Structure formats: C-alpha cells, structure tokens
Image (spheres, grey):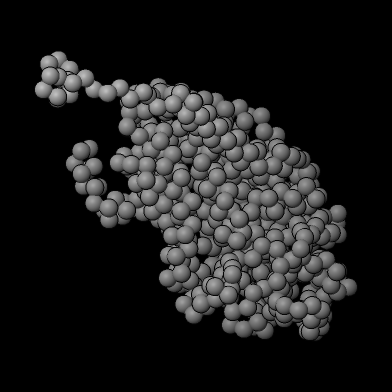
Amino acid sequence: MRTIDHWLTAPWRRSTVAALAGALPVLAFPAPSLWWFAYVALVPWILLARSAPSGRRAAYDGWIGGFGFLLAVHHWLLPSLHVFIFLIAALLGVLWAPWGWLVRRFLGGRPTPGRGAAALLVLPSAWLMVELVRSWQGLGGPWGMLGASQWQVSPALRLASVGGSWLLSFLIVVVNVAAAVLVSVRESRVPAVASLVATAAATSAAWAWAPRPHVDGRVRIAVVQPGIMDGGDRRFAREEQLTRQLAGQHVDLVVWGESSVGFDLGDRPDLARRVTALSRAVGADVLVNVDARRSDRPGIYKSSVLIGPNGPTGDRYDKMRLVPFGEYIPARSLLGWATSVGRAAGEDRRRGTEQVVMNVGHGLRIGPLICFETAFPDMSRHLAEDGADLLLSQSATSTFQGSWAPEQHASLGALRAAETGRPMVHATLTGVSAVYGPDGQRLGPWLGTDASAVQVYGLPLAHGITPYVRYGDWPVDGALLVLAMLGAAEALKTLRLRRSGPAPLVPPARTVHGWPARPGR
C-alpha cells in the first residue's frame, strides 16, 4: 500500500488514475450493460479520494474523476463536438469536487465506526445532489444517471416504481461505499456490514410492498423505422411504403420517429394528404414528427403531430427540452464558436411551452416525448398524472450510428415505464426502437440500427398510480435533508469552538540561564 501511495504522489499519475476510476461505471450502461458492475464500479474512485493527502487533493480527485465519468458516458458525442466535449466534461466535473472532499472527510485516515456509518448516508446523498444539479436541461440533462444502469433488472425496476431512478442511484452508491469500507477500513467493517443488511432488508420490503401494475386492457401499436435515408423525400416515401403494410392488421396507432417529416405540413399540404390517406388505409391515427420552420409562427420547431383519417386532428406537442449544442447553443453570443469545431446547431430551435396528452380514439390517451426528453423522469411522471395511458418517445440517433448511444437511449424507456406504471414505446428513425410494458420489462424484439422495417407490438395497459408518481422525487428531498443536517451539525460545531475561545497562552517557565524549561529536565 505504501508503494502505491508513493507512486501516486506524482500529481499527473494521480490525476490519470482518478480519470480512469471515474470512467469505470460506463461499463454498467449499454452497450456493455454489465449492470452488476455498477455496485463496485465506484470503489477505486472512493479509495483514491479517501487516501488523498489533503482535503484539497480529495476535491481535485473528485473533479478529475467526474471529468472521466462524463467523458466516458458521453464519448459518442466526440465526432459531433470534437474538443468541446473535453471542455464540457471539465466544467461539469467540478460538481464531483465536494463529493471527493466528503469521501476523505468521512473515510480518510482511521475513521471511527460512527464516521463510517455516517458516510453510508452522506456520500450517497452528496452523489444524488450531483445528479440533481446536472439534470438541469441547460447542463445537458440527466443522461448517465447511475440508477439508469439497472434498466434490465426486474427487482430494480420494482424499486424504480417507488422512488424513481433517484432511489436506484442512492442504493448503488450505498453499496459502493460499504464495499470500499469493507476493503480498507477495518474499524468500520461492522457498521458497513450492518448497513448492507439493513439496505437489503429495506429494499426487499419495498420490493414486496410496491404495488404491481394491474393490467386492464391491451392495444396494438405499430412502429415504423425507415433506417438511414438521404433526403427528406426519400425517407418519407420509405415510411409511407412501410406504413401501407399495416393495412388489415388492426393496429390502434402508428408511430413514426423523430424528424420523420422534414417539412411543415402547412407549407406542404400534399404530405398531410398522403399521411391522411395512410391513416384511412390502416384504420388508425398516425403520429408523425415534424422538424421544420413553422408556417404559422417564426422559428424551427420539433413537433409531434397527430394525423387521423380526416387529416391533422389539431393535437400537437412542441418539444420543450432541447439538446444543448445539438438543437441550440447555450449563451450563443459566447459559445457560438462551437459551430466551427463540430456539428453544433447553426440556428436555435424554439421550445414548446407545455406537455400534451392526445386522444387517439379507442379510449387511448398518449403522452408524447421527443428525443432525450425520455431522460427526464419528471416529464413522464407528469404525463401519467395528466391521464396518459401510454408513453411515446419519438427519437433519431442517426448521427450516432455505430456508437453506444442508440442502446443507451432505448434503455431509458424501461425506467420511465417502471416509474409510471405505463407502457412505453420508443420509436426511432434508425434504431434502436424498443417497447416496454408497464413494469418496465421489454416486449417483443428491438429494431436495431441495421433495420428498415415496421413492427407491431401488443402492449398491456395499466392505470394504477405508482408511489413515484404519487410522491415524486422524495429520495432527492431526503438527500437534501441529510446534507442540511450535516451542514447544521458542522455550523454548531464551529459555533461551540468559537464560544469556547482559544486556549490561554501561558508564558513558558525560564531557567536561571534564560532558556525555556523542558519537561523532564
């Protein structure tokens, strides 16, 4: 251990190790999907920050680790943003600096059992605060939340219905902290084991108590995925061809992907008439996605538009949360140069103002989301509160074919379905398209990035209210309370020290020769 500590004294070596340690959790996400690895992936990072020679260095370890984490989780953005992705990761990585400092504060040196036990509550709470801050849409949104790595684990999905992906992130960090304590702090092993047992008991109780979705109906939804096509007209023609294959299959709704129509329907009524004819032939409404400059108001919008057998129904949802740099540039006057080093938005798209629940007939109400809005737990929760029977995501990951992005994006639908108790359809232009039941379990085949096809899915409907929909982001509120109590305790401690005042200065005794007396002489 001393040899390792000596080797890490070189700042560049320690920073390299911190970045690599921070990047490790990416293996728990798709495409590797090593979900079990999430429960130990933070241990090297925790051990590094714990061994820091000072609180300042521990904060630096947190920062560099955060840089590595963000760069790994968003590495597929490199072809689009180039060097700018490094700047973004460096800026947002600062969010982990307080977390690194707290790791050393509670686990550094020889922590008492009390400090070790407190770490199991404080450190997961601090991690949740990092996820909360970076979940702000202006900072990139909640992509890569640690809890999202558990999208294919049935017990975890049940817990998501109780506290959302926030609860999963909290529990994952608890296990990582306990594992780090067991490895490195002999004095605190008993509380670490006790906390693991308590966590297992609490999660088992929540798993058993959480209400299961009660299926009370079924619908047939068709997903049209045209694949990579050059030009909006060719893509529209392929979507039209695939949709015609649905005639006679008794579907309740046809869903096209994001940017499936590249022209405003007010400017191109011929396209609206063609989709209307498709709706008549299939016997179901068609939900298209228009990415174009609007004819009725200024600016470019991305909009979910519902078209029935009599033409556009009037139901329209304009995307509210835009992708930073991809669909708009934050503070364009300062950061507009990003367009010269990558494929950043040349013109900012406009935002919608409210979420919309659409009635598509057959008693079916749908809640549309567009692209990375599926990363935001609150948006799907509000749609469920507003009466949506089915959540729909229209997406396009054409730019990121061959990367891990399509699989990561498709996996988010499982979390949103489990959190709300509503089935989720994730329809894309170029894959991966996926469908999930109200418990978050995948239904039917994925349409991969090599598919140009139409697929019909039978979905069960459920209308119960999950604890997460009812109570919202309560794990975040609990984490805020823990950190507020920690701040109050530290403030009281500082106040007591000030009141007690400094120890009186006693002049040293002198010998006959004028030298200070020495004990024992």
Q: Can you name the residue that lies furthest to the top here?
A: 520
Residue 355 visible in the displayed image: yes
The answer to whether residue 79 is above or below residue 514 is below
As drawn, which residue projects farthest toward the right? 310
Q: Position of residue 383 (x, y in %)?
A: 75, 52
**Horizontal and vertical percent for residue 185?**
34, 29
Which residue shows up at 70% across the image and 46% down it?
420
Identify the residue shown where x is 49% and y is 72%. 80
Q: Residue at x 45, y 55 (%)?
A: 93
Residue at x 66% of width, y 29% of height = 209
Q: Is residue 288 left or right of residue 41?
A: right
25 in relation to 513, above or below: below
Query: Closer to the camera, 444 or 321?
Result: 321
Residue 67, percent from left and from top: 42, 56
Quadrant where the image shows the N terminus: top left
In the rendered view, does 347 fall on the left or right side of 214? left
Q: Position of residue 59 (x, y in %)?
A: 40, 46
Judging depth in this view, the residue of 209 and 166 nearest the camera is 166
Q: Is residue 193 above or below residue 101?
A: above
Please, is residue 6 above or below residue 81 in the view?
above
Task: Work out which quarter of the rendered image holds the C terminus and state it.
Answer: top left
Front position in the image: 396 or 19? 19
The picture quadrant where one finds residue 296 is bottom right
Residue 433, quarter of picture:
bottom right
